[in-house]
Image (cartoon, helix red, strand yellow):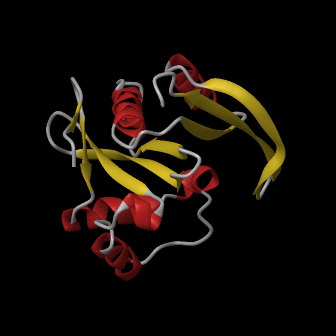
Amino acid sequence: MVELKGKNIYLRALEPKDLDFLYQLENDTSIWEISGTLKPYSKKVLRLYLDNAHRDIYDVKQLRLCICAPDDQCVGLIDLFDFDPKNKRAGMGVVIANPADRNKGWGAEAIEILCEYAFSTLDLHQLYANILEENEASIHLFVKLGFDHIGIKKEWVRTNKGFKNELMFQKINTNAS
């Protein structure tokens, strides 16, 4: 894989050593609403997932990478999902696990690195992000990074408190062929 390095962070493939981090993050109920998770994951299931994490994005239609801080600690995950090579697009999602590690610019840098990779290496025409309407921090982040608000999905996400609107943001690769 191309080196995915920024000024302060780098992105790398998932490794078997990431099992405990993945287990903690996937079972964090505070982010289930944004990730669409419905039930806890066992370490056994996550180990199987890690065993298959090497598979090609063209095969599994997803790319999940660890966001690593300057001390080589994995602080979050960034994904391309619903990869559609025919229409040259993919969804993007990012999470920094520990709230104390947020607002350090690591998520923004990870998005910039993955956008560059998606546009230059995968030759995508567009990326999109789906963000809950009340997630002001993520909305601000994606807008700051050049994503345009293109629509609203009314009452799209069901929660234990009712339905929530989801906003859709898009970034077009102006250099695409």
Return the x and y of residue 166 as percentages of the image width and height.
74, 41
- Asked if residue 81 can be seen in this view, the reply is yes
| Towards the viewer: 120 or 9 | 120
Q: Is residue 91 left or right of residue 58?
A: right
From this viewpoint, is residue 135 visible?
Answer: no
The residue that appears at 48% across and 29% down in the rendered structure is 176
Q: Is residue 73 above or below residue 110?
A: below
User: In the picture shown, does residue 137 fall above or below 63?
Assistant: above
Q: Measured from the top left, where is residue 116 in percent x and y?
A: 36, 31
Residue 120 % position (x, y): 36, 34
**Res 63 quadrant in image:** bottom left
Residue located 72% across and 34% down the image:
133
User: How many badges with numbers are in the image?
Assistant: 0
Q: Nearer the viewer, residue 152 or 87?
A: 87
In which image quadrant can residue 118 be found? top left
> Residue 2 versus residue 103: which sits nearer the camera?
2
Could you say which quadrant of the image residue 147 lies in? top right
